[in-house]
Each structure stands twice: as C-alpha cells, then as structure tokens.
Image: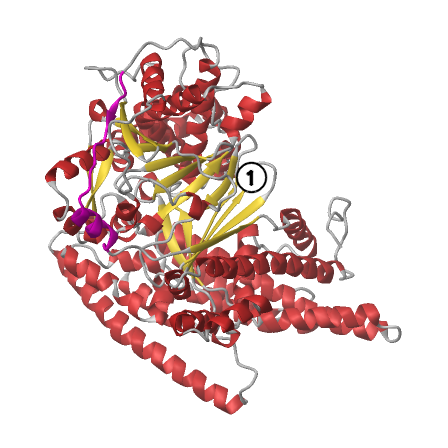
C-alpha cells in the first residue's frame, strides 16, 4: 500500500513538473519538445493512476474513456462534433450505470468486511492472476504453444542417428525426469526472483542501488538452460542451475556491507519458510483440472500415481513415472522396452479414439458431457488425469502454423502439457492455468535439452531390448449415443491463424539508437513500437483486392451470403476502432505467486495526432528533398513538423512507461476489477465478470479486444523458434498476437483470428478464405511496420541536429 501511495505522489509530481517545465522555458528556446506536446502528454499521463481502490479505479476509467474511432473525412465538422458528443455521452452513461454503480456498491461491501476484520487480499491467496485464470483461461483456445528445434539440431550436428524407438524413449525420459524434478525447478525460479528482488529492495536507498537494480536482468543473460561442461558427474540440471545462481549472487553479496548481508539472509530465510511451499503447491504439475460450471478446480495427484501419456496412431498409452512401489524415476531400459512394445504392435488390442471433440468442448459443459458417457469409458478417460504430460507421436507437418499444428489428439484438456512431434522440431502446448508465456518458454527449453541428453546417452547403447508387454492402453469404445453427445457438445470459437518472419528487427533496433542520438526523451522499446504500429495498422490497412472480390463472389450464394457480408464489414476501414490490447506484464519479480499483471492499453493515436503528423512530416521531408530553390525554407517547415512529431512519439513512450509501471504494481484497471470480486459468492463473481463483455467501452477499458504478448528475445543458446499466445475466454477477444525473437535475431509473429467471420466462413466450407484474410492482415502489418520504421529513420536522420556514429548507418535505404 505504501509503495502505491508513494508512486501516486511521484506521478503527480511528474505531471506538475512537465507543466512547470513547459511554461518556464521560453518558446523560442524550445528545440526538442513544444508546449502543446508537453500539455497533451501531461494530460495523458495524468489519466494513468493506480487503481488500488474503487475511487482510483473509477477515476482511471472515466478519464480514459477513449475516442475509439478515427475522425471521418467525409463528414463536416459540425456533424462530426455532434456525433462525437453522442458517442461520448453514451460511453459515460454505460460506464456510470454498469461499472461505477456496481463498483461503488462492491467497494462499500468490502469496506464493511474490512471493519469486520476481513481483507480483500485474503480472497486471493494465490494472487489475482491465478484466481482469474482458473475460470477465465480454461478453454482450449486459452492454451499457448512454443516450438523448439534443439533436439534434432544437436543430433544432426553431431551426426547421431537415433532409431524411432530411442527417439521416443528420450522424450519419455525427459518428461519423467521433469515430473520428478519439477519442485526443484520451481524452487530455482522462486529463489532467483526473491533473492535478487530482496537485495534490490534492501539496497534501494544506498550507494549500491545501481548495482542491484538490474540484478535479475543480468542473471537472465547468464542463466543456463542445460548442464554445461563444468557439470559434476551425476549432477542433475536443477542442482547445476542452483549452483550457477549461487556463484552469481555471491559476486554481488561479497561487495555489500555486512549489515545488508545479514538483513538479506534473514529476509530470504523467512520468505522461504512462509512462501516457497505455497508457491510450489500453486504451480505444481502433479494436478489435474476438474471442470465445474464456474471454473476449474486443481486436484492433486501423487507422484507414485503419475504417468506420461503416449499417443500413437490415435491410441493412448500410459507409462509409469516411477519404478514399481518406489518414488524413484522409471528405469530407462524398462521405458525403452515399453516404447518398443508400443511401436512394434502389429495388431493393437484397443481401438483408435478421437478425443478432439472433447478437447474443444466448452469447459462449463464438461460436467454435463460426463453424464452422457458410460461408466466404463469414464473410468478409462479418468486415467488421463494422472498424466500431466502427453506426448503425441503421430508426426505433424513442420510447415503448419502452430494454431493448426496443435489440432490433433491432445487428451481432454484437463492436463498441463501436450508435446507434438514434427520430425524437425517439438511443439509444447501449455495450459495457461499452469504456465504463462515466459515460464512455458523456459520449460520447453529445459525439457528439450533433457531429451537431447537422453538421446545422446541412448545412442551409446546396443539395440538389444528385453521383452516387454505394452504398457497400459486406454480401452475407450464410444457408443453411437456417446459419439453424438461428443460431436454436438458446444465448442470453443473457431479460429484462423497466420505467421510471419518478415519484420526487420535490425532496423527496429537501429531506429532506437537513432532516437537516442536525436533525443534521450524518446524512450520507445521494441515492444512499444510494435504496439504503436498495431494501432496505426488498424487505421491504414487495406485488404488485397483479390480477397475482396472473392468475398463479393460469395454474396451471390444464399448459403454463403451472411458470412461474406460479415467479412466485408470487418474489412470496411470506416468501421475501424482503435484497438484495445491486453498486454501481460511480468509480476513474478515482485512476488512470484502473482505471475502476471494484465493491463489494457490503447495507443493515444488520436490524442497525439500520430497519424496526421506522420503523413505531414513525410510529405514535408519529400518536399525538402526535392526542392531546388528555397531549400532552407523547406527545411524549416520539415524541421518544425518533425519536432512536433518526435515530441509526440516521446510522449507516447512516456504513456507506455507509465501504464507498465502501474501494471507492475498490480494496480491496473484489469487487476482492480478482479479485486472488486473479493469474498463474493462464486455465481455472483462470474455474473459481474461478464458485464464488461456486453459493452464495448467497458470491455476496452478492462479486458481489451486483443492480446499482445511478446516474450522478447530468447537466450543466445536457446533453440526456441515460435510462440503462439493464448486467448482468454472472453468472446469479445478477437485477435491474439504472439511475438518471439529467436537466438539468431529473427522475429516471428503468430496471429490467431477469432473474429465472427472466421466461424461463419468455416461453417460454410470456406476456412481457407478465412486463413487468407488473416494472413493478408499480418503480411500487411509486417510490411507496413518495416515502411514505418524506414520513414522514421529518414525523417530523424534528415535533421541537422542528429549526430551520426558509424554503427548506426546500417539501415536499409
């Protein structure tokens, strides 16, 4: 609470200082940022206040009621002003009726509970995000995926040729050892964050603050994801990583005063006793999801009861994670023989089964679906609850988008991880209830490296296998009635997807260096630029003419007319709204159990006139470049516009930074709204949570219409290739952007499209057209972003004030 209060005071001082500076400096001396820009930025920054209490939450939303549409060019000023007044009046009426009033009542209810000794935080023992994902990210579309290539790359590099049997065995053993060491892996994740965070807090007001402020970030650069050549024989990965971290933190501890070291030891010891066991329980893989009408309940399973599930030729097999009657990991030779028995069956004893309908079924419907399945089949299906990790051996094509690649057998959706094999890579499909994007990426790399180590070991063994019976196979035989119940169950929204690797990351990085040369106030990160251009793209995108014609051709068929009309309406740029994006902000460095703090963000594209300024500056620059007479006058016109534009971009970066700082404190509108649900009956919680979904203005403020998740650049020795983000269960969430930059500096973007026309086109047999639409949208985003960055580079470097250095001139022309 004290941190939030101090932050609020600091933010207010920032706004005051911005205005004081603006009015204190003579306008003739302003060479970097103009008075109107500072006033506009100050007003925008003032809109972002911590939403820790109802008053802050309500004020935050009221000041951020957005101008959601671009000013139309075909309406006169008076008519547009009238329409804008009506839209703002409606937005405020909706906000007051359906948000302010319930929020005020809920705040009063919680205040009464406080007087009775109950705190809102007590309703969220595992943090706000875990509370939220248990009911709002449980559908099949709420799973995210990561792809690694390390296993096959390393084997090829060393010319190792594994049999199919040993290839599978390596991955089964990696899964088994991951289950056995998972508590130690979580221990590492927890202590690395808590140890560095505690040190940062203890040194905050000392001369050592600068050294410890970015300590965790420095560790991220050193953190190993595999055992190195200096590993002690017999040492497992978790122990090796812990040793490396101890060496890392010791270097900092050794230069700190004894008093700080003692305080640090006491603080981390106390945190370990009180918080670590709860964190390990919260994040445990040894649980399955029990679906209810209102959410998921995580049910524990014992390690001695755990299996690794194998999917082969659409049949499910269960390999025990432990040796019989012990808690020791399964013996590799036994597993090798069991895998051989699975792969070598000429006549399988159980039928193939299709569980994809179950995986796509709405989770709230699962209790009803179970009532329609016979007890014998239910008993078999429930055995999957004891398999936290499923390994699908039915090879999937490497070239498929991740969203399509995962549309294969993947259990019933009650487990944590499914791993798919493409022959060249492995794709990890994660439940968001267990994993966020960054932890999923880390574990995918860890398991891949473990499988690689097992593969190298198995390559040294002779191909002599002891005879073994095939492991337990699921004998599921659905009747016609049961199949009908599965096939008619309500399912998640259909999606189309696209991917691109056309972003020129080097140009983006070089642009940031040029910005720094031009003005230190322009602090836009790579992700800021991606989100900024996402908003610009929403207003500038024009679809390929062939796609439009293909849709118009469908208008002539009554069966496809509605789908075509829906798609054409989406493509109509006059209907474009400023996208409201939900951006996950890492909360684990403050408190590991909090995992993620979500924030909704709309680029202030209209408030800062970013579209008009960009067009005007490019036009002025072209005029200056082409001028033959009065070049100084042409330059002065360009220079003045350029200063305004760069000032607007600097302001945009400040707004981005402010929003992220508040989200990191757990004080965003999204978190504040979750907090209001404390101590309410579960049915009422779900009812209130659905209110924003029914009104665009509330949805934009609280939940967003899109997800934009960027897990950043991976470690230099990582083999991660692609990342697909998840979509929460909000039906208004229409697009999910996933961004990953691999170790070679290649940025890849995955876009999942859940807009209504996708479902309609798919239903009438035109799923391929829906895919073409989203691919065109993403391609246009990538090429447009590259052009936008090139324009910014041209206009910034054209300034006579930009100092050049040799390492900047690497941009394409």
Residue displayed at 22% across by 69% down: 102
One can see residue 598 in this view: yes
For this rendering, which residue is in front, 254 or 152?
152
Residue holding disc 1:
742
Rendering coords of residue 302 (x, y %):
20, 27
Q: Is residue 119 magenta?
A: no
**Span of residues in magenta:** 469-489
From the viewer's perspective, is residue 481 above or below residue 323? below
Rendering coords of residue 34 (x, y %):
63, 70
Residue displayed at 19% across by 49% down: 366
Q: Name which quarter of the figure residue 113 lies in.
A: bottom left
Q: Tell whether 275 sits left or right of 530.
A: left
Rendering coords of residue 310 (x, y %):
32, 29
> Which quadrant: the C terminus?
bottom right
From the viewer's perspective, is residue 372 above or below residue 93? above
For this rendering, which residue is in front, 254 or 536?
536
């Amino acid at each position: 609470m004290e941190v939030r209060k101090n932050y609020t005071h600091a933010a207010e001082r920032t706004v005051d200082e911005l205005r004081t500076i603006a009015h204190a400096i003579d306008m003739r001396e302003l060479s970097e940022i103009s008075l109107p820009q500072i006033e506009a930025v100050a007003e925008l920054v003032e809109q972002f206040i911590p939403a820790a209490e109802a008053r802050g939450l309500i004020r935050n939303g009221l000041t951020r009621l957005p101008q959601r549409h671009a000013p139309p060019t075909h309406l006169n000023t008076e008519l547009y002003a009238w329409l804008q007044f009506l839209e703002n009046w409606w937005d405020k009426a909706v906000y007051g009726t359906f948000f302010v009033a319930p929020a005020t009542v809920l705040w009063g209810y919680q205040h009464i509970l406080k007087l009775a000794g109950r705190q809102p935080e007590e309703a969220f023992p595992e943090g706000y995000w875990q509370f939220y994902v248990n009911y709002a990210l449980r559908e099949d579309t709420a799973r995210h995926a990561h792809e690694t290539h390390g296993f096959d790359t390393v084997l090829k590099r060393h010319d190792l040729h594994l049999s199919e049997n040993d290839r599978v065995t390596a991955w089964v053993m990696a899964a088994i050892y991951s289950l056995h060491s998972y508590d130690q892996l979580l221990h590492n994740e927890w202590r690395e964050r808590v140890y560095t965070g505690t040190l940062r807090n203890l040194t905050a007001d000392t001369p050592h603050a600068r050294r410890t402020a970015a300590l965790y970030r420095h560790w991220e650069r050193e953190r190993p994801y595999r055992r190195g050549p200096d590993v002690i024989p017999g040492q497992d990965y978790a122990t090796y990583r812990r040793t490396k971290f101890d060496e890392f933190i010791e270097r900092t501890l050794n230069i700190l005063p004894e008093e700080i070291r003692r305080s640090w030891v006491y603080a981390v010891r106390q945190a370990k006793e009180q918080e670590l066991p709860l964190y390990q329980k919260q994040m445990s893989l040894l649980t399955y999801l029990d679906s209810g009408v209102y959410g998921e309940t995580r049910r524990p399973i014992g390690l001695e009861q755990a299996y690794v599930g194998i999917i082969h030729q659409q049949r499910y097999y269960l390999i025990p994670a432990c040796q019989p009657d012990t808690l020791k990991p399964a013996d590799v030779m036994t597993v090798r023989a069991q895998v051989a028995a699975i792969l070598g069956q000429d006549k399988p004893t159980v039928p193939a089964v299709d569980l994809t309908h179950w995986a796509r079924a709405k989770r709230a419907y699962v209790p009803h679906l179970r009532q329609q399945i016979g007890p014998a089949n239910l008993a078999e299906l429930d055995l999957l609850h004891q398999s936290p990790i499923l390994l699908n051996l039915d090879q999937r094509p490497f070239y498929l988008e991740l969203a399509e690649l995962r549309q294969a057998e993947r259990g019933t959706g009650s487990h944590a991880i499914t791993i798919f094999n493409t022959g060249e890579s492995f794709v990890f499909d994660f439940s968001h209830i267990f994993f966020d994007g960054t932890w999923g990426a880390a574990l995918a790399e860890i398991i891949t490296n473990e499988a690689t180590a097992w593969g190298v070991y198995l390559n040294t063994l002779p191909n002599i296998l002891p005879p073994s019976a095939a492991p337990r196979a699921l004998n599921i035989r659905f009747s016609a009635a049961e199949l009908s119940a599965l096939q008619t169950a309500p399912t998640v929204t259909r999606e189309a997807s696209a991917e691109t690797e056309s972003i020129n990351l080097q140009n983006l990085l070089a642009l940031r260096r040029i910005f720094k040369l031009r003005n230190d106030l322009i602090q836009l990160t790579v992700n800021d630029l991606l989100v900024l251009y996402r908003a610009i793209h929403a207003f500038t995108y024009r679809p390929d003419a062939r796609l439009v014609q293909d849709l118009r051709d469908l208008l002539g068929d009554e069966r496809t007319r509605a789908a075509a009309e829906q798609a054409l309406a989406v493509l109509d740029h006059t209907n474009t709204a400023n996208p409201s994006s939900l951006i996950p902000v890492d909360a684990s460095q403050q408190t590991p159990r909090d995992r993620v703090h979500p924030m909704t963000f709309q680029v202030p594209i209209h408030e800062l006139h970013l579209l008009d300024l960009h067009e005007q500056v490019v036009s002025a620059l072209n005029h200056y470049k082409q001028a033959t007479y009065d070049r100084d006058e042409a330059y002065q016109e360009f220079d003045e516009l350029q200063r305004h534009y760069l000032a607007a971009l600097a302001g945009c970066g400040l707004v981005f930074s402010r929003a992220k700082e508040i989200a990191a404190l757990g004080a965003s509108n999204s978190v504040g709204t979750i907090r209001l649900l404390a101590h309410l009956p579960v049915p009422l919680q779900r009812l209130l949570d659905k209110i924003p979904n029914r009104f665009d203005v509330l949805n934009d403020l609280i939940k967003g219409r899109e997800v934009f998740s960027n897990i950043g650049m991976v470690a230099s020795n990582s083999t991660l290739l692609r990342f697909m983000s998840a979509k929460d269960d909000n039906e208004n969430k229409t697009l999910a952007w996933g961004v990953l930059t691999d170790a070679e500096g290649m940025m890849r973007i995955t876009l999942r499209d859940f807009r209504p026309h996708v479902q309609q086109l798919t239903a009438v047999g035109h799923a391929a057209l829906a895919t073409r639409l989203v691919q065109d949208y993403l391609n246009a985003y990538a090429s447009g972003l590259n052009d936008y960055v090139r324009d910014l580079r041209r206009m910034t470097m054209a300034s006579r004030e930009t100092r050049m250095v040799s390492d900047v001139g690497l941009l394409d022309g």
